[in-house]
Amino acid sequence: MPDEIPLPGSIHGLSEAEAQARLQAEGYNELPRPDRRTPLRIVLEVVREPMLALLLGGVAIYLLLGDLREAIILGMFATLSILITVIQESRTERVLEALRDLTSPRALVIRDGSRKRITGREVVRGDILVLAEGDRVPADAVIVECRDLQTDESLLTGESVPVRKTARADAGPSERRRPGGDDLPIVFSGSLVVRGTAIAEVVATGIRSEIGKIGQSLATLETEPPRLQAQTRRVVRIFAIAGAAVSILAVVLYGTLRGGWLDAVLAGIALGMSMLPEEFPVVLAVFMAMGAWRISQARVLTRRAAAIETLGSATVLCTDKTGTLTENRMTIAELRLADDDTFRPRETQGAPMPERFHALVEYGILASARDPFDPMDKAFHTLGREHLAGSGRLHDPEWKLVHAYGLRPGLLAMSQVWQPSDAQEFVVAAKGAPEAISDLCHLGAPELAALKRSVDVMAAEGLRVLGVARASLAGAAWPLSQHDFVFEFTGLVGLADPLRQSVPAAVAECRSAGIRVVMITGDYPATATAIARQAGLDTADLATGEQLETLSAEQLAQRVRTATVFARIMPDQKLRIVDALKANGDIVAMTGDGVNDAPSLKAAHIGIAMGGRGTDVAREASSIVLLDDDFGSIVHAVRLGRRIYDTLRKAMGFIFAVHVPIAGLALLPLLFGLPIIFGPIHIAFLEMIIDPVCSLVFEAETEEDDVMSRPPRPPDQPLFSASLIGWSLVQGTLAFVLVTVIYLTALTRGMPEAEVRALTFFSLVLVIVSLIFVNRSFSASLIAALRRPNAALAWVMLVVPVMLSLTLLFPPASALFRFGPLHLDDLALTLAAGIAVLVSLEALKSVGRGRFRVAVH
């Protein structure tokens, strides 16, 4: 335990006064808090939206006219819009807070010559840390002394295997101060001690540590804005400008020709609302929220809903190796004896281990910790439980560990001496680097050559190779060195971080969908190549971090066009790779689980974090979190993203079409001096209730048959293409003409204005319902589309008649809408209008189905 670690007499540590002075001068060992948007600031941003401004303007005019009821109704619409937006926008990034939690564990330091346990945030530069197995390192520190020290730096490097550390006095001449690699005399903040003990002097805290530098890069990165959101806002802005111009003109004409300037302003507001497609951002939010709910059923959490759609257009998927493609746990993949006889446990599931290999596993366990913390020690124990339990080859729990020899820079092997409960002779087991074990066994030249060939073969398969040896000792006088034992070579053990079973199929489906999969890892090239080959990736073109260091931004952009595997990559290089892919015009999805992945997760168009083994930092920096760490869930998300885009285009086309008759019927009376039929309350009712409800029908539509067999759409493809707008205008124009004919006919026959308003409004609503059926599918006929189940459509078909009945039969509602009574023949006429539009447009679709289908894809 840390409190039991002996200290050299020369180590006194900082005094409390010195520590407090440095704390005041350099700050706490934590990252600065990010600026958070307050609810008030979000509200101020929301009220700038054009539709909300029109609604609030309408409220003010009605108050001036003394019409409190209509003012309250419009005010409710405005309040609901503000409330929804504030709730959505309040989900801001918490990346730096997660980093702060990770970098502030409890720490044992030496101050004034005594041990003292403090919070990690109070550690300062110059503090002496006392570290032991299981401790989280609170700051970057140079190792003064250590014994058999290994740390897990996978959060910073992505390497699944712990790295060996050495003391400053024993380190080589290298000035390298970055995480990763063995025999560095530095421990890094956020890493975990998995073996041994150490005394280290803090050299960097807070933002000056390696993990702090990652936090700084996160603070300077802007999350990629959703492209659909940008496109819809641009369209709404264009319509707002056009609507404002037309509305101002209408106000001037109305006020000049009819008088009554307040009524003129109300008419202008109604016209502006009819021309402003406020439903676009509403429908976009609904689709993204429903998509997030649907994908959550597959154990995928969506932190930024718009990223689901963007994932559907991804052209490159950058995946980390450790914990993403692999399970992030060490297992023994191969046992190899001196005669090259091999046994692969993973390939022979359920088969008994041959007797010849029992000793190799047994002595590997004896050379490991009895209660393992190190992942490689755990792998030996796991294999022993699976294959040696009940065989009598596992050592008795009553055996005593009487002596141990740790790793040293000059001898990368460790030995443990055990005293069996029923024998006088001691048992010695050693494991370590193959060359160190061969040295302990004093192998001859032929044996060394054969050993090197075996090690090369195993390393080429991406295995981490250890040698195992055994010896015995008759007396209790321990030699000073492991070299003094008479070791016998037992065999080689190949350890690997196994590939997830779902990965090959997921990679193959990504390839069929036209998505290029790229591996970016901090691990060694041989290991990266082996895992990439198992996953089904192309391993012909591999690039290393050392090679990327020499490339300019332009050269890197060219290099990433062909390279599929990137090995020995540092966090800043991951970010450079993502930026280079984006510079090439790719839509980049990035998966990861460690702190080292956080900057690239945030910089990518879509960041996908592993939720089970992933860190809080990675999850907070991401757009999507895979709760079950199943790489195959990414394919499900891609499929859903493409479906969302298809159905979203159908919904947007429908909304475009609907606005043509709404705007036309609001403008027509102003131009020709006819009775005003629609006020702001009617337009708000249509746009804030009926259209979003109808749009749910499209969100519930099933996916197109070719959704995962076509390539990703071009990144620059607009949501509102010319073909989509053209088809929408055709639909809207036909609907406008038909409803206008009904409106004018009713006026010429002398119907009261209230009845004309009701007849026209009902006709318009039923025409809108018919446009839902028209836009459900561009590739299937109406009959085929009706056969596809859609629960939302069934609900709409029930809700719309009920709502229309209430506005007609419930006196307060009919008074609010200023509706007169309708007779059965009037209702039959409105139903006939909807059917006529549906039949006409379906006939037009059947003539040019191939051309209209382009509007979807």
Image (tube, grey):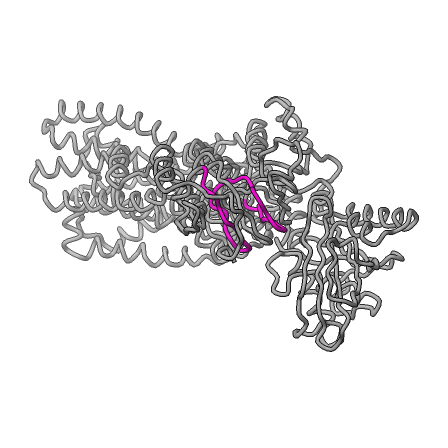
Relative horizontal placement of residue 87, taking residue 208 as reference (left or right): left
Q: Is residue 514 magenta?
A: no
Q: Residue furthest right?
A: 446
Task: Examine the image and state in which quarter residue 45 appears.
Answer: top left
Q: Nearer the viewer, residue 102 or 209?
A: 209
Q: Position of residue 825 (x, y in %)?
A: 27, 53
Q: Position of residue 180 (x, y in %)?
A: 61, 40
Q: Nearer the viewer, residue 458 or 146?
A: 146
Q: Residue furthest left?
A: 66
Q: Nearer the viewer, residue 840 or 620?
A: 620
Locate the C terminus and report the quarter of the image it occupies: top right
Task: Examine the image and state in which quarter residue 75 appears.
Answer: top left
Relative horizontal placement of residue 789, taking residue 370 as reference (left or right): left
Q: Nearer the viewer, residue 855 or 529?
A: 529
Q: Position of residue 467 (x, y in %)?
A: 77, 54
Seen in the picture, residue 253 relative to 543 is either above or below; the reply is above
Figure label count: 0
Q: In this orientation, does residue 840 appear? A: no
Q: Position of residue 727 (x, y in %)?
A: 46, 35
Q: Is residue 151 magenta?
A: yes
Relative horizontal placement of residue 683, taking residue 649 as reference (left or right): left
Q: In this orientation, does residue 854 appear? A: yes
Relative horizontal placement of residue 239, taking residue 364 as reference (left or right): left
Seen in the picture, residue 511 relative to 391 is either above or below; the reply is above
Numbered range of the magenta stretch: 126-155
